[in-house]
Amino acid sequence: MTTVNRLRQTKFVALSLLTAAFLAPSSESKAQQFPSRNITIVVPTAPSTPPDIITRVVATELAESEGWNIVVENRAGAVLTLGGSEVLKHPADGHTIYAMALPVSAAPAILPNMPFKLESDFAPVIKISTSYNVLVVNPSVPAKSVADLVALIKEKPDKLTFSSGGFGTPAHLIGEMFKLQTGGRATHVPYNQFPQAIGDLLNGTNHFMFITTLPVVDMINTGKLRALAVTAPKRLAALADVPTIAEQGFPGLAVTDWVGFAVKSGTPGDVVSRLNGAINKVLAKPKIREAFAKVGAEPAGGSPADYGDLVKSQMAHWAKVVKDSGI
């Protein structure tokens, strides 16, 4: 090859590289271009459940503040994994979001054929909310404290029942933790619908339940249910007279429920950052705190890494509970 040809080839390669660099979108421009179409948030629970309400509150405010078109879809079932499977059918570009909640972190231990790997198939975006449960009993149950209930369960093994809105729900998982840590033997009664679980608790068919706080505050105040303890680290304003479960000698039963967003693994990091930043701004608004309070929740926020660490720790925690309880 002559010197002239070498120079021509060098100029051609340099020009090609320069053109490619100019035409290829930078990380910053990808974030600026996002979203390029509707964003769909897949909620893996039924409509009007706390994760669904919380997600819709965030989606509405996000659409208003960012000008994004957002659609919320419900794909309930299989310990919240049907929703995750739906998200994985779509491109890894941030336009389809998985609204995860606590039960999905127990799903790998519960389901024999888990449809995906939570730790590798999804990229964390942000923790949306925290909430807590309250241990309530039907008034016919003579227990006035957690210790009373434990004593009663041990006195009548397998006779007392606790209800939940379904297998693998927080009410079920915390109930199994309760049995493990107290050594009591009570029977779990799962329902397909959350209202049915509350209904049979109210009519005395079942004896106790760990339940999200908001739906039962009025029932507690009117004496339809008796509250023994909240699973929060400190007393809740809505139930100021109800002690924490740690105050009553059971610190291991302090459980925080949560909802968070994730996207398909492989989504560009700048898109994840764009989503994280926009949602953090929304969660900082007073009206979001007020809206969350109506379902007994508090806004969370933080970095994708923070949320990823939470999911990993929750997976390890609930895997042990599932194994030890044999559920």
Image (cartoon, rainbow, N blue to C red):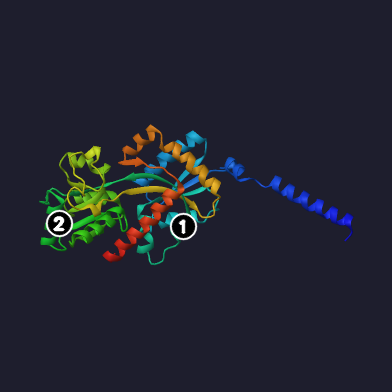
For the residues labelled 2 and 1, the Cα–Cα distance comes to: 40 Å
Label 1 element class: helix
Q: Quadrant of the C terminus?
A: bottom left
Q: Quadrant of the N terminus?
A: bottom right
Q: Amino acid at mark 2?
A: Val
Asked if residue 301 can be seen in this view, the reply is yes
The residue indicated by pointer 2 is: 150
Q: Amino acid at mark 1?
A: Ser
Q: Quadrant of residue 56?
A: top left
The residue indicated by pointer 1 is: 85
Label 2 element class: helix
Picture coordinates of residue 318, whole percent (x, y): 33, 59
Asked if residue 98 can be seen in this view, the reply is no
Report the residue at 34% width, 45% height from top. 130
The answer to which of 138 and 32 lies nearer the viewer is 32
Q: Quadrant of residue 303?
A: top left
